[in-house]
Amino acid sequence: MFAEALFFGFAVLSVLGAIGLVLFRHPMNGAMSLVVTMISLAGLYALLSAKLIFALQLIVYAGAIMSLVLFIIMFLNIQDSDLPTEKGRWLYQLGGIIVILPIASFLIKIVKSIPGSEATIVGSGFGGVKEVGLVLFQDWLLPFEIVSILLLVALVGAVVLAGKRRMGK
Amino acid sequence: MIQDYLILSIILFCLGILGVITRRNVFSVFMSIELMLNAANLAFIAFSRLHESMDGHVLAMMVMAVAAAEAALALAVVILLHKHKSKLDTNIFSLLKG
């Protein structure tokens, strides 16, 4: 009963944050509502007994990535006059809803046909660091290495993009 | 129930698509993409709980790594474009149209 009330609260908070991200005009307000969404998603991961992912969501997503985005938004010092005017935004959003709604209802119908189980909280032996680490370093070793190469490429790319240009000029 | 989590993930993903196709602010589009990645993560974790296996958690960690790399590169590109054009409109950034 308590877990269901928690799920309802977190679900409503995350959907409200996502709606705020789509509707707010200034990116700073959108970033703050996205932080609300990410923190409530971390609560949902805890309800699904994914302890490691819960901590990683708080540290990496709500902590590192969102503070990087907020830093860049503040760094560029965006005024209201810098923002695109977005004329006819409501019309576009209405059209988008009309396009997306059939797809969403179709997907929800598919999901409802899955034989479900109760999402009770599992105690030890599920979702901790040990279990995830065992699977990660046994079955998923090659994808793990590929992800490390991807991070290296992103590092080099960021240095190249942000570095000084000295090409002939 | 697991289905509730999956339905929530579908709703969040559709809101992310709505943000990408209707907003013209670069930051809003970028954060909508992050929202879609988060919705996919929620679906991974929910299916992992349904089957009581750990593979979904590993995939969610990889999605987080890809999102971090994407954030670093995309924000560097946004800073460069803002330096050249001093605008944040995605319609201005059509340099590769030929």
Image (cartoon, rainbow, N blue to C red):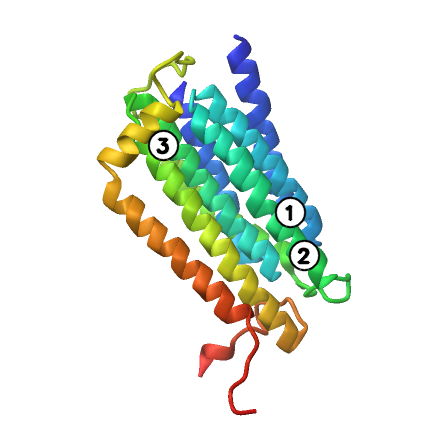
Evaluate whether residue A62 shows in this view: yes
> Which residue shows up at 57% across the image and 91% down it?
A169
Front in this rendered view, residue B3 or A107: B3
Q: Which residue is mark 1?
A: A31
- Contact between marks 2 and 3 (CB within 8 A): the answer is no
Marked residue chain, label 2 = A
Q: Are marks 2 and 3 on the same chain?
A: no
Counting from the top left corner in percent of width and height, residue A113 is at: 30, 26
Evaluate whether residue B18 shows in this view: no
Real-space Cα separation, disc 2 to disc 3, in angstroms: 31 Å
Front in this rendered view, residue B59 or A24: B59
Marked residue chain, label 1 = A
Front in this rendered view, residue A135 or B7: A135
Q: Which residue is mark 2?
A: A73
| Residue at the bottom extreme of this rendering | A168
Q: Are marks 1 and 2 on the same chain?
A: yes
Q: Which residue is mark 3?
A: B57
- Amino acid type assigned to the residue bearing label 1 in the image: Ala
> Which residue shows up at 60% across the image and 51% down it?
A68
Secondary structure state at the residue bearing disc 3:
helix
Task: Please tell me whether residue A62 is drawn above or below residue A45 in the rendered image.
Answer: below
Real-space Cα separation, disc 3 to disc 1, in angstroms: 26 Å
- Amino acid type assigned to the residue bearing label 3 in the image: His
- Amino acid type assigned to the residue bearing label 2 in the image: Ile
Counting from the top left corner in percent of width and height, residue A95 is at: 53, 54
Secondary structure state at the residue bearing disc 1:
helix
